[in-house]
Image (tube, rainbow, N blue to C red):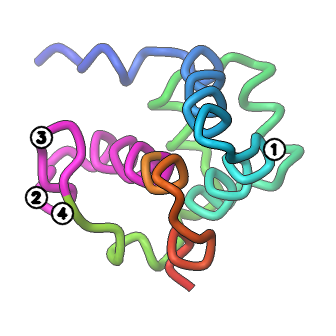
Amino acid sequence: MKKHRIFTTSFASVYPHYINKAEKKGRTKTEVDIIICWLTGYTQQELQQQIDHKKDFETFFAEAPQLNPNVSKITGIICGYRIEEIEDPLMQKIRYLDKLIDELAKGKKMEKILRS
């Protein structure tokens, strides 16, 4: 079975789009980084290394130190799919990230986005 194209896409190529989406709505790169680090367990330095080495999404999530234990609290619909019903674990992780960035761009408070 052929891998979905996003799995082999470089995280570094999508990262600026996350920042752009957030900044258009008055949010910051720092907030985007906090969200990514919260989700994946990367430190800021480790995140930057992933970007610098142009790791693809599959590797980016495979090398993530630890997915946040509260990811099960990320629910809803993204790209027409209910997150909790996505069967492919990697696609689900990518959609978690998409959902969090959407919430940031929609003006949600960081405490709510980070499921605190």
What residue lies at 51% left-to-right and 43% top-to-bottom? Answer: 61
Q: CA distance from mark 3 to mark 1?
A: 31 Å
Q: Which residue is at the front of the view, 106 or 88?
A: 106
Q: Secondary structure at mark 4?
A: helix
Q: Is the residue 11 above or below the residue 61 in the image?
A: above
Give yes or no for contact between labels 2 and 4 (Cβ–Cβ under 8 Å). yes
What residue lies at 61% left-to-right and 50% top-to-bottom? Answer: 64
Residue 18: % across, % down: 57, 32
Q: Which badge, 4 or 1, is on the more N-terminal residue?
A: 1
Q: Which residue is at the front of the view, 115 or 6?
A: 115
Point out which mark residue 84 bears. Answer: 4
Q: Secondary structure at mark 3?
A: loop
Give yes or no for contact between labels 4 and 3 (Cβ–Cβ under 8 Å). no
Residue 22, picture quadrant: top right
Instruction: From the viewer's perspective, tell me whether residue 40 is left or right of residue 44.
Output: left
Q: Which badge, 3 or 2, is on the more N-terminal residue?
A: 3
Q: CA distance from mark 4 to mark 1?
A: 28 Å
Point out which mark residue 80 bears. Answer: 3
Please provide the residue range marked out in magenta: 77-101
Residue 3: % across, % down: 24, 19
Residue 77: % across, % down: 18, 53
Give yes or no for contact between labels 3 and 2 (Cβ–Cβ under 8 Å). no
Instruction: From the viewer's perspective, tell me whether residue 97 is left or right of residue 74.
Output: right
Q: Which residue is mark 1?
A: 46
Q: CA distance from mark 2 to mark 4?
A: 4 Å
Q: Amino acid at mark 4?
A: Glu
Q: Nearer the viewer, mark 3 or mark 1?
A: 3
Q: Amino acid at mark 2?
A: Glu
Give yes or no for contact between labels 2 and 1 (Cβ–Cβ under 8 Å). no
Residue 80, picture quadrant: top left
